[in-house]
Image (tube, rainbow, N blue to C red):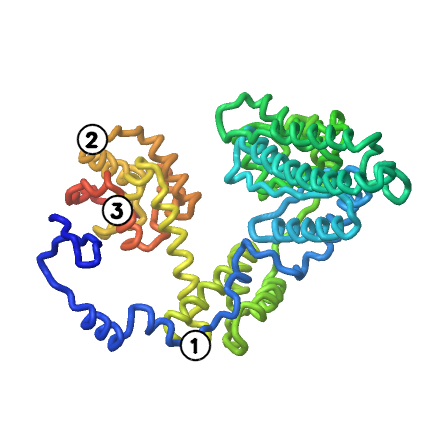
Amino acid sequence: MTDEPTTDGRRTADRDFEVDLDDVLEDDEGDEGLFDDLLSGEPIFENKEVLRPSYTPHELPHRKDQINNMATILVAALRGETPSNILIYGKTGTGKTASAKFVSQELEKTSQKYSVPCEVEYINCEVTDTQYRVLAQLANTFIEQNRTFVDSRVEELQDLREAAEDDPSVLEADDENDDHLDFDSPEAVDDYIEELLQEKSEMEDVPMTGWPTDRVYARFFEAVDYVERVAVIMLDEIDKLVEKSGDDTLYNLSRMNSELENSRVSIIGISNDLKFTDFLDPRVKSSLGEEEIVFPPYDANQLRDILQHRSDVAFKQNALSEDVIPLCAAFAAQEHGDARRALDLLRTAGELAERDQSDGVTEEHVRRAQDKIELDRVVEVVRTLPTQSKLVLYAILLLEDNGVHNVNTGEVYNIYKTLCDELDADVLTQRRVTDLISELDMLGIVNAVVVSKGRYGRTKEISLSVPVEETEAVLEADSRLSDIENVTPFVQARFDN
């Protein structure tokens, strides 16, 4: 293919076909586009983001006591004092993070109102899960704030310097003009500006890898102590950080106030694990867990209030039938009072209704949403299983496909060995395969129950807890398992009681 010049000097690729632009435009105007039909229906949502876990509402029903408790502890920051460290416990979806973020927003808003230097920094330790990354992220945040402070200060000093040309007395600090230093001359202002700019040039960002941890900590220490401030560091999923990196980070953060000159640091730790402090060093535990706040699960009535509160903002008026919110609340209450699950269920039901171009959300949409969420969870869990666990699960599936139900460990192990031979994979011992079955049971993919066979001893009966076809499709999407040819399981005759 070669390029040929056109009459207006542009070059075009040599084509074997001709296109009439007028015909294309005429066709486009006559036919509806791919999305036109989808956009033709009336929208059900007013603001879907209100139903997402990342949204922080202006009001949190049934969490007033916990919020007030946090506020009474953190109010010390508004007096320039060091607030006590706080540990927040509770199961998933009990409002821990939303409540902590709400209190933090109010704290920062009030600090600006009274001109008190107070900042809250949020870190999700499930994502930022090593001591290096936590310290680097905090250091870079405060370094950027310090640069902004220097720029603002330099601008003030330059205005002061210009005013001093006409009236040198403005350089003298007094009760009404004490927001700057007492300078002897305009040249002293210039020297101080130069000093600030030099400090700013030395504020180097911490790379996300490559430095020794003690150097990263030193840079964070310098950054947080550069100006007077109270820094509240919120560590969400704090147990993930301790599990992966130990308690060194918490030890350093909880002890640094004794060395800081200008600043004060307070920690808010949020955890789903009520026992994670059992693994901490006693010194860290005593300094970190000064105040503990527990968030109990929501019951069905409380979930109904939360959903009603959010749905008033999230949906168009009269978009929900009367039984939608009670049903969502009932489903979520069965899942240990998880408000996040309830919100996901309501949002998914709304999305299904929009796809159906329905006038509103009905009970049927909620039930379909429940099935969809459950299936999505299963698909994600199965997709991320290690290869050996997938082979064990595939063996159980093959037995189910061939009409063998409530299989025992020996039957699964025989098929598992055949699958390993097909893939030229390592064959684990039967004891290890039994452990993998227990892990699948814990994940809710299979149901494994130990039953007694009388004089024949005890065995583990295994049955699937997930849809067969969808699970099989996920397993066969794995590039390794897709190489398995048709394997017909051989099952010995059973002599059941």
| Identity, as a three-letter code, of the amino acid under mark 1 | Glu
Percent x, y for residue 321? 50, 76
**Quadrant housing residue 354:** bottom left
Q: Earlier in the sequence, mark 1 or mark 3?
A: 1
Measured Cα–Cα span from mark 3 to mark 2 = 18 Å
Q: Secondary structure at mark 3?
A: loop
**Quadrant housing residue 227:** top right
In this view, the mark in front (3 or 2): 3
- Is residue 354 visible from the viewing direction of this image? yes
Q: What residue occupies the far right of the structure in this picture?
A: 175
- Mark 1 surroundings within 10 Å by alpha-carbon count, few (fewer than 14), some (14 through 19), many (20 or more): few
Q: Which residue is mark 1?
A: 42
> On the picture, is 440 further left or further right than 75?
left
State whether residue 21 is above or below residue 382: below
Q: Secondary structure at mark 2?
A: loop
Q: Earlier in the sequence, mark 3 or mark 2?
A: 2
Percent x, y for residue 133? 54, 32
Q: What residue occupies the far front of the structure in this picture?
A: 166
Percent x, y for residue 352? 40, 67
| Identity, as a three-letter code, of the amino acid under mark 3 | Ala
> On the picture, is 282 further left or further right than 387?
right
Residue at x 34%, y 49% (from the top left corner): 463
Q: Which residue is mark 3?
A: 477
- Is residue 221 visible from the viewing direction of this image? no
| Identity, as a three-letter code, of the amino acid under mark 2 | Asp
Measured Cα–Cα span from mark 1 to mark 3 = 37 Å
State whether residue 425 is above or below residue 391: above
Percent x, y for residue 393? 31, 43
Q: Which residue is mark 2?
A: 424
Q: Nearer the viewer, residue 301 or 340?
A: 340
Q: How many marks?
A: 3
Q: Is the Cβ of the residue at disc 1 closer than 8 Å to that at disc 3?
A: no
